[in-house]
Image (spheres, rainbow, N blue to C red):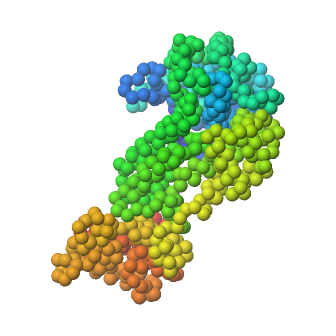
Amino acid sequence: MAPLQKEELRDALKQSQNGKSPGLDGLSYEFYSAVWEVVGDDFFSAMKEVLASAMLPESDRHGVTRLIVKVDGTPKVTDLRPVTLLNCTYKLLSMVLVQRLNRVLPEVITSSQLAVPGREIMSGGHNLVSTIQFINHDRRRGGFVASWDQVKAHDRATTWYLDRVLEAMRFPQVFRGWAKMLHEGATTCLLAGPGGLTRRISVKFSFRQGDPAASPFYALQQEPFLKRVAVVCKGVTLGRGVTSYRQVDEAFCDDETIVGQDINDVIRFEEEMRKFESQSGAILSRTSKSKIMYIGNWAGREDSPFPWLQVVKELKVLGLVLTPNYRTTLSQTWEGVLKGFRSTIYAWKERNLETMFQRAEVARTFAQSKLWYVSQVLPLPNSVAEKIESILSSFLFSGKPERLGLQELCNKTAKGGLGLLDVRKKADSLLLKQLTRMLLKDQEGAYRHLSFWLGAHLRRYLPALMARSAVLHTDPPPYHQYALDRLLDGFQMYGIKATDLAQVSSKTIYTNYTSHTLPDPKITNKFLQVNFPGDVWPRLSYTTLTAGPRQAVFDGIHGLVRNRARLYEQGRVLDPWCQVCPTVITLLPPRSTQEHIFCSCVLVSEAWTLIKEIAARHQPELRGEEDKSIIRFLFPRDRLDEEVTWVVANYLDIAQEQSIARGNKLLAPAVRGRLADRLKAAQTRAVRGLTVML
């Protein structure tokens, strides 16, 4: 074994996540990052001594466990999930061992286990959907999908069985000693109320909760069992002859799913599980948590090989809702995703997000991100996309009578949008990226599935697909037809080459998808003489603008300001007239347009005269510019354009808050004072030096 290097500890620290609760010593990752230059050498020396002696320091053997409730209402003991807080010194050392272990895991774990570096859970989902399609396609025989649950899987894992597995895999004695070291003498205590701790409890056999090594150790422990399952179970065979492929199971950590067309596979699995239980300490959940679903010609069967194995019409596996029918799988899986998306949006609706930029950031980060996992496995149905877009539009344009098309908002800020993601194009780009990723790994099951369904259709681009595997020479079913269409798009329209699959990224695909499909904002067609790329859009990115003024610029450009004239055109009010000016102007009242409410209304006219004068000091050409052009930021840029934009944008923000929302009259001295306060605050934030002459 190579000696520990200081860089290994430093890399582990860089990869650690901030914001995590520390262990009993109270020292966080952020602390070690901040003082690394001071303590790094001493910490490195201490960790070298720990590995040399194969003995943890006393403080790193102890943790504190909190029980997280997994259900609503009063939980049972089985409804509690233990989360253990361990010292960061321990976790950093464990992460170093995991980094070393990860280099060899793909070589020593050759089963269907997906929780291995370089393998992806999405491939497992694809393989299961593909297998169900095959069984439905094979009208001679039916089949089944069975999902198995283990009782407290990680808690039942045993360190002594792990050591036997490591020995059988010929891991060095030194590494086996380090694995034992992480668990010897381990204790924990329960967090009981605010600040209260129970007595120490010895952790005698299971892996430590919260340990970075727990997941790879568990994958190693499961490997002998999964390899036996692959040997004794017949599974489902795609194709015939030497190029056929046998699909038996998909596993992700303790989630094990088997497929087959021989019901005796279920019995064989249970027999192998009993042998594994006797050696490892694992226990199969012989309750309703283990389930079987019949498909193809067997759909509708109610019999079960075991009284405790529940027969169901759907299975939740690897983040998907699998059913005997592809269309139902598609709709039910996406309905679940849509529910989570809608809940996230509604939760954020209750918060005071004043600007569309803020709401767009929330939508991208917290809501749209919920769509992307399933998008890599299943196509996004149009009906679901329409609902997502409706929810997004309502959220983004909250309180605004005027709306832009969502695709306009998907433009980058430099093109007048909010940088929102086009959910349809993003979903397609993620699916295409996942397909290209699976085509790179010709030794894995996903490649063999794709070659079976699509090899004959892609032989022009990927001749190896036909040479390596059994190939179906008919039109593929709906799932793989959609995958074929996306791949052909990539090869024919976007220049993807078989030799460059490794360089393909979802970001590049998305850019290609949207470069010619996202429409220019409608406002560009209304003012054809305006140079939007050079003069207008850059103003949306000025760093001197805070949230409110930045939104004022966006609203001004796109004409999203609430005004009575526009409401009248929409049939939402009885007349378009300003409701303030008639008390002063006895003739025909002015229309309450965007220009009027900011420039000529009696509530703001004095203040606007001041603002226009300040703007002209910085850019004299604005003296002859129309008010409408200024408040919509359609005028040409000049050397002090950022100062002019800052003044006008802050004025619009103040006017929106004071006169439009509250009906207060804006006086020039008051506006000058507000601008001075905001300018001082901007300088305090160390924003680029503004040379505003108030």
Residue at the spot 71% in from the left edge and 39% down from the top edge: 474
Q: Can residue 673 be seen in this view?
A: no
**Residue 233 location, quadrant:** top right
Describe residue 585's horizontal placement relative to residue 321 as left or right.
Answer: left
Report the side of 500 relative to 80 (left or right): right
**Residue 357 on image: x %, y %:** 45, 59
Left or right of 450? Residue 655 is left
Q: Is residue 589 left or right of residue 481?
A: left
Task: Specify the quadrant that holds the C terminus.
Answer: bottom left
Q: Nearer the viewer, residue 618 or 152?
A: 152
Q: In which quarter of the image is residue 113?
A: top right
Residue 676 position in % (x across, y down):
36, 73
User: Where does residue 324 sit, x and y in percent of width and height?
Assistant: 56, 29
> What quarter of the picture does the N terminus occupy?
top right
- The residue closer to the viewer here, 168 or 304, is 304
Residue sitting at 61 percent across and 48 percent down? Answer: 430
Residue 480's place in the image compared with 389, above or below, is: above
**x 63%, y 33%: residue:** 133
Q: Residue 57: x and y, percent?
A: 62, 29
